[in-house]
Amino acid sequence: MVDELVLLLHALLMRHRALSIENSQLMEQLRLLVCERATLLRQVRPPSCPVPFPETFDGESSRLPEFIVQTASYMLVNENRFCNDAMKVAFLISLLIGEAEEWAVPYIEMDSPILGDYRAFLDEMKQCFGWDDDEDDDDEDEVDDY
């Protein structure tokens, strides 16, 4: 009977060792899967942006400087999404509502070249919505150069 118990104990110890090895292997596989998942999620979901998404612009002249700064800042930190002037102008237009949106429609309808020129589009917005360049030239040089 003692010999049988010793054999049973030995078998249990061997089984325990095999299960421990299998458990270690499974834990390593789980670690690799978690790392792979994190990598895939970073590719699907970009990291959160430190600059908040810009507010819409309705044509109110007093809000134009704020709108331009917000959109320029957002595009700067997300420069991979706004790789050319046409993308920048399209982004600005997507945020226009009301009077400002109505102002942009004719440019879109006639496929104006200004849609591919960010600086020219900003200049047109400033002219239409009452931006006084003389007062704000120094402040806006950096934004216009983006």
Image (tube, rainbow, N blue to C red):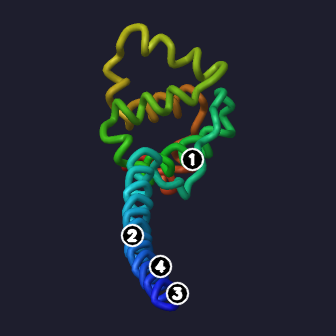
- N-terminal-most mark, 3 or 1: 3
- N-terminal-most mark, 4 or 2: 4
CA separation in Å, label 4 and label 3: 16 Å
Judge from the rendering whether residue 137 lies leftward or rightward of residue 36; answer left or right: right
Q: Amino acid at mark 1?
A: Gln
Numbered tag placed on residue 47 in the rendering: none
**Mark 1 sits on what residue?**
70
Q: Name the mark nearer the viewer: 4 or 3.
A: 3
**Mark 3 sits on what residue?**
1
Q: Quadrant of residue 109?
A: top left
Judge from the rendering whether residue 94 lies leftward or rightward of residue 61; answer left or right: left
Q: Secondary structure at mark 4?
A: helix
Image spot of residue 87 (x, y percent): 37, 33
Q: Residues within 10 Å of mark 1 (few under 14, many from 20)?
A: some
CA separation in Å, label 4 and label 2: 15 Å
Q: Amino acid at mark 3?
A: Met
Numbered tag placed on residue 12 in the rendering: 4
Image spot of residue 90 (x, y percent): 43, 28
Q: Amino acid at mark 4?
A: Leu
CA separation in Å, label 4 and label 1: 68 Å
Q: Residue at x 36, y 24 (%)?
A: 114
Of residues 131 and 1, the one nearer the viewer is: 1
Q: Residues within 10 Å of mark 3 (few under 14, many from 20)?
A: few
Q: Name the mark nearer the viewer: 4 or 2.
A: 4
- N-terminal-most mark, 4 or 3: 3
> Taking the image as drawn, is residue 141 in sight?
no
Image spot of residue 138 (x, y percent): 48, 56
Of residues 138 and 74, the one nearer the viewer is: 74
CA separation in Å, label 3 and label 1: 84 Å
**Mark 2 sits on what residue?**
22
Q: Residues within 10 Å of mark 4 (few under 14, many from 20)?
A: few
